[in-house]
Amino acid sequence: MEFPDLGEHCSERTCKQLDFLPLKCDACGEIFCKDHIAYSWHRCSSAYKKDVQVPVCPLCDTPIPVKKGETADVVVGAHMDKGCRLDSARRKEKIFTNKCFRPGCKKKEMMKLVCDQCGQNFCLQHRHPLDHGCPGQSRSISKAGCAAQMRLLESRQKSSNGQLQRNGCRTKS
């Protein structure tokens, strides 16, 4: 063998496999191969120190502390009989509470999307003033904004005989 000092043997009595990537159990400190590293696979005597599970009440979704030697079912049953707050489970907070103010839209968002011009709340689809027909949109715009609106109107409002219907813009002075 070329490297006699490389690797370690599995501590499981029935295995004793030479493993070049041995794993150390964090509960008992013994060395195991990948097949015996789980607490149940090597019947770890110190598993109770690390393998802790906390039961959760099915009614109020709160974790219930269980002392050593107690049965989880008995402790959860006692909690449900004594101090379980059933109201907190039924009273779930709504996440999507911000309703869109555009007529006909029933979408709700997690956060408020308030229009700078009219001050109303809208969904992601209608958040821009042009998308919700904002009444506060009559304020003056820059020359570049007016040019962009004119290009948009030109592409949308071509009449059947090829003439353009021009709408004027108020620009900032």
Image (tube, rainbow, N blue to C red):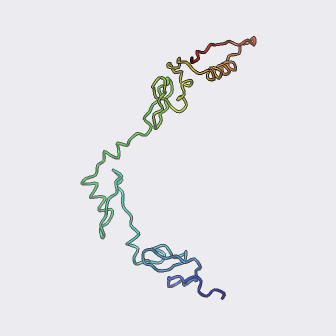
Q: Residue 172: horizontal and vertical position, in percent? A: 57, 18
Residue furthest to the left in view is 82
Identity of the residue drawn at 28% across and 54% down: 80
| Vertical arrangement, residue 79 with respect to residue 132, above or below | below
Image point 63% across, 86% down: which residue?
3
Q: Quadrant of the C terminus?
A: top right
Along the viewing direction, whichever of 52 and 89 lies nearer the viewer: 52
On screen, residue 114 above or below 137: below
Is 89 drawn above or below residue 34 in the view shown? above
Judge whether 64 appears above or below 48 on screen.
Answer: above
Q: Residue at x 59, y 21 (%)?
A: 142
Give 113 or 93, whichever is nearer the viewer. 113
Q: How many marks?
A: 0
Drawn side of residue 18 relative to residue 91, left or right: right
Residue 60: image location, x then y, percent: 33, 50
Q: Residue furthest right?
A: 161
Q: Residue at x 55, y 83 (%)?
A: 8
Q: Position of residue 99 (x, y in %)?
A: 45, 31
Of 172 and 121, nearer the camera is 172
Q: 66 left or right of 31? A: left
User: Is 37 situated left or right of 160 in this image?
Assistant: left
Location of residue 145 in the rendering, given as x and y in whole percent from the top left corner: 61, 23
Q: Quadrant of residue 18?
A: bottom right
Residue 164 relative to residue 20: left or right: right
The quadrant in which the N terminus is found is: bottom right
